[in-house]
């Protein structure tokens, strides 16, 4: 039995095979869903054997409970609820939630920056004293 990591060329081939299997699963789902589920199973076995992470593009395309290939609208339901993406597998009923608070925070930051850059021409500075009770406006 060998110790240590496998060579990079082996890992690269394994990753290519995973991508090929998932793309075939995507193509075959409408005709033969059982075959696409088998492709997902084979891709998972390869990723476990070579200790690889599932590629991010394919990670949410299969159910992490029943390991079936998911096609939105056919065997899974996707909803946006409380700043998270909720994916429900209609095969087993498993629900996975993916938060998207980072995106919301970034959008809020961009909105504030846009607001601040559009107000550059004003000379007013608003200051608050302790406890925000009195607001003072100073002209420079």
Image (cartoon, rainbow, N blue to C red):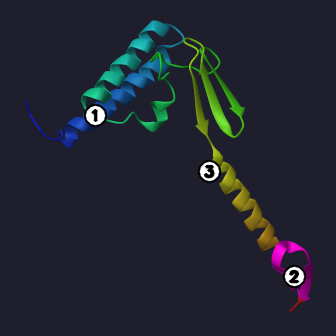
Across and down, in percent, residue 125 comes to 85, 83
The residue under the point 47% across, 14% down is 28
State which quarter of the image contains the C terminus. bottom right
Which callout, 2 or 3, points at the residue further toward the start of the chain?
Answer: 3
Residue that numbered label 3 is attached to: 102
Label 2's element? loop
Q: Residue furthest bottom?
A: 140
The span picked out in magenta is 120-138
Residue 51 visible somewhere in the drawing:
yes
Residue that numbered label 1 is attached to: 51
State which quarter of the image contains the N terminus. top left
Across and down, in percent, residue 29 comes to 51, 13
The residue under the point 67% across, 54% down is 105
Residue that numbered label 2 is attached to: 122
Along the viewing direction, whichever of 17 and 4 lies nearer the viewer = 4
Q: Is residue 10 left or right of residue 99?
A: left
């Amino acid at each position: 039995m060998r110790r240590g990591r496998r060579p990079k060329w082996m890992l690269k081939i394994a990753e290519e095979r995973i991508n090929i299997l998932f793309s075939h699963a995507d193509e075959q789902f409408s005709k033969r869903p059982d075959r696409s589920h088998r492709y997902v199973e084979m891709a998972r076995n390869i990723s476990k054997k070579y200790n690889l992470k599932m590629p991010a593009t394919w990670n949410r395309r299969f159910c992490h409970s029943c390991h079936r290939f998911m096609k939105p609208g056919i065997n899974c339901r996707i909803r946006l609820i409380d700043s998270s993406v909720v994916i429900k597998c209609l095969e087993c009923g498993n629900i996975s939630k993916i938060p998207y608070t980072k995106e919301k925070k970034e959008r809020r930051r961009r909105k504030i920056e846009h607001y601040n850059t559009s107000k550059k021409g004003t000379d007013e500075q608003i200051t608050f004293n302790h406890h925000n009770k009195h607001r003072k406006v100073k002209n420079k």
